[in-house]
Amino acid sequence: MTRSKCSLAPLLLILSACSPACTSVPEAGAPENKGGPVAATTKAETPPSEVTPPPGGEITEAKGVDLSRLSEPQKTSFFQLINSEPSACGKPHSLAVSLRDDAACRDSLSVSQFIADALASGASPSDIKANMEYVVGALQPRKIDIEGRPVYGNERAPVTVVVFADFECPHCRAEAPVLRQAIDQFRGRAKLVFKHFPLSAHPRAKVAAIATVAAQAQGKFWEMHDIVFENQTALSDADLRKYAQKIGLDMKQFDADFAALKGKDIVEADRAEGEKLEITGTPAVFVNGRYFNEYMFGGTVVGWIDDALRR
């Protein structure tokens, strides 16, 4: 995703404030809004444990964390934070102890790097502490049903990227090739699954989604996906039928499936699941169930996939 220009100080609602997205409730007079795709109310499923101070006092090493952007005062704040904040894996010791002694807890490394990056961007320690529960919560994997949904890439790949998208959303259109390029880069080790999340602000998005389900029934979801995104301002029934013809669908079958709204249940089921995941806008991307945000793993889907492969 394209990193948006926004400050990390203060960090209030950091997980949703900066990602370019189409939202359900647009700004007055504007077709889109730049809000976050996932509500920042998701907290860690397991409350953080109380931190047991390590013997020997404060730990002043952080193996695996890049501190090169920090000034000396910021490094002091960093070590104070990782010595006082609990392990991201719910264990009764600090992030600092986790980095030193618990290599299996990759989430502690991720959260510690987040702290360093936030400090380097100007966030205060109090801002960071106020948002730690939400940062850890973003790393909690969610269960997402992908059965029967269109897949791009190796269906047996160990990493699954799921995107909830709306066919009238320009941010979804821009993100579509980025996601597939990321999948291609990993050569069979990652796959992309598409799920529908038509927004109420976009009156033709649901109808377009139903048309793509009709194309999926003929094995041409991605072809329809591409042509619909390319023409997202022209999505009348006649337009959708024209696109179906252009990609070579059996028009008798397409017309019958589209008229019968055969894809309606699938689209509505995807939307309902997205709401349970607290999605508020599109695109919303999950990597092995973890909500993608731009403040970890280099801020790219490639970085998130790479981290998932290391787990």
Image (tube, rainbow, N blue to C red):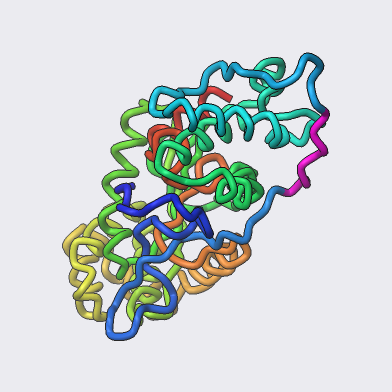
The location of residue 227, given as percent across then percent down, is 21, 60
Q: Is residue 89 visible?
A: yes
Span shown in magenta: 45-52
Residue 204 in the image: above or below residue 192: below
Residue 286 counted in the magenta span: no
The location of residue 224, given as percent across then percent down, is 28, 59
Residue 48 counted in the magenta span: yes
Residue visible at 52% across and 68% down?
271
Left or right side of 61 for 301: left
Left or right side of 299 for 156: right
Provide the major secondary structure of the magenta segment.
loop
Q: Is residue 253 visible?
A: no
The location of residue 116, given as percent across then percent down, is 49, 33
The one of 103 and 84 positioned closer to us in this rendering: 84
The location of residue 305, given as percent across then percent down, is 45, 33
Residue visible at 60% across and 42% down?
139
